[in-house]
Image (cartoon, rainbow, N blue to C red):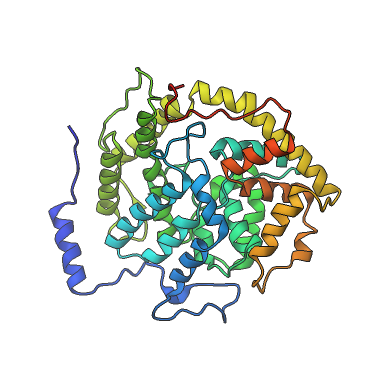
Amino acid sequence: MANYHNLSQELQQRIREDRRQHKENPYACRDEDALRREMDHDRANLWRPSYVRDIEKIMHLPSYNRYADKTQVFSLYKNDDISRRALHVQLVSRIARNIGSVLNLNIDLIEAISLGHDIGHTPFGHAGERILSRFLHENTGRYFNHNVHSVRILDQLTPRNISLQTLDGIICHNGEMEQQEYRPKPMGDFASFERRVEDCYVRKEAIKELVPATLEGCVMRICDIIAYLGKDRQDAERLHMLSKDADFIRGDIGNTNAEIINNMVVNIIENSYGKDHLSMDKSYFDYLSQAKKENYRYIYGNEQMEKQVHEDLEPMFEQLHARLLEDAIHHNEKSYLYRHHMAWIEENNRFSRNFSMEKYRETEPNQLVVDYIASMTDDYFIDLYHEMFPTEKHDIKYVGYFDEEL
């Protein structure tokens, strides 16, 4: 039987009293503190506050559209009932805003970070990310991470004068590393932020050392895990992918999507209200960590999915990457890299005052190719591969609505 926890009566009474007195959270990020590269542009007003502007800028980017056909976890299925990245970022936003609203934080900033955090993700989820990072590192010694690339999109490839607070929350999200406590680390300026970004490209460990500068960024970071933990189980069950030996512990947080979301939200609020950091009970943290390990054991390590990644997806990435890299090195204006990606970047910056197409054309060839491949949706990747290699045997074989399960 499902078990949904509630906030203690003492805390509920305290929150209601604080609301009656219109008490503000001194640790919340204020709209007037938003830092932008162009401070005289994108000034907040009554109908478009600071971080609402970030939300709208992110949602109106063509890269945001491509969330709709990017894998969340399950790449090999044609099924509209399982999650894609478009749904994931909305779920993160909803859960994080629920927590932020009760803690009296800046929910507009939370939403901006949530909606933008995966905008730099590759096609085919983390498998695509690992492959692309390997290519980049072998050729340049640099690493690819989707959170860093999300910042590259919003701050360089299609610069929209996004606030430093939003960019910081995006780069510092790490859905693979849970913590019992989240304490914001003071924010520097854009120069120090750029050094952190560069550090992530050249030093593998740097990605694990990032700490959000705001409580809002901390909320989004833990909610990234909360949003996918139970939802991935739900999707796996719908696809009949869970093996008979799958035995998820219940513990304090429960083991269904609804239980995990409710109980984690309640416990975080109970432990964090009125404080300058986020925390959860030790038992909740332990069960959260265990639940994530179970997802890896029962879901993410699916042998059939890994087999197709190794036998087909990796060779397809390798061939596509090699051909596009050759086109970049030789400045092949007739190639798809130029006719599609370069043209797409130029079109999306028609009205930008801070983007130089001439300068972008001078980008290191490996980075150009990474920019292009990372921008692709799953279907775009497959179609481009078959367009460029029509006689090759490799393909991604989807399980359709009426096919047998893997």
Q: Nearer the viewer, residue 319 or 7?
A: 319
Residue 195 located left or right of residue 97: right
**Compared to 406, does 267 lie above or below?**
below
* Image quadrant in which you'd find residue 350: bottom right
**Compared to 110, does 43 lie above or below?**
below
Residue 303 located left or right of residue 375: left
Question: Does any portion of residue 274 appear in the rendered image?
Answer: no
Q: Measured from the top left, where is residue 169 in percent x and y? A: 49, 58
* Image quadrant in which you'd find residue 342: bottom right
**Compared to 311, does 349 lie above or below?**
below
Q: Nearer the viewer, residue 34 or 285?
A: 34
Q: Which of 336 and 316 is in front in this view?
A: 336
Residue that appears at 60% across and 38% down: 128
Q: Measured from the top left, where is residue 185 in percent x and y? A: 48, 59
Residue that appears at 45% across and 69% down: 51
* Image quadrant in which you'd find residue 142: top right
Question: Does any portion of residue 57 appear in the rendered image?
Answer: yes
User: Which residue is most to the top?
Assistant: 244
Residue that appears at 52% across and 63% down: 60
Residue that appears at 28% across and 35% down: 256
Q: Measured from the top left, where is residue 395 in percent x and y? A: 63, 29
Image quarter hosting the N terminus? top left
Q: How many labels does the image show?
A: 0
**Compared to 350, does 72 lie above or below?**
above
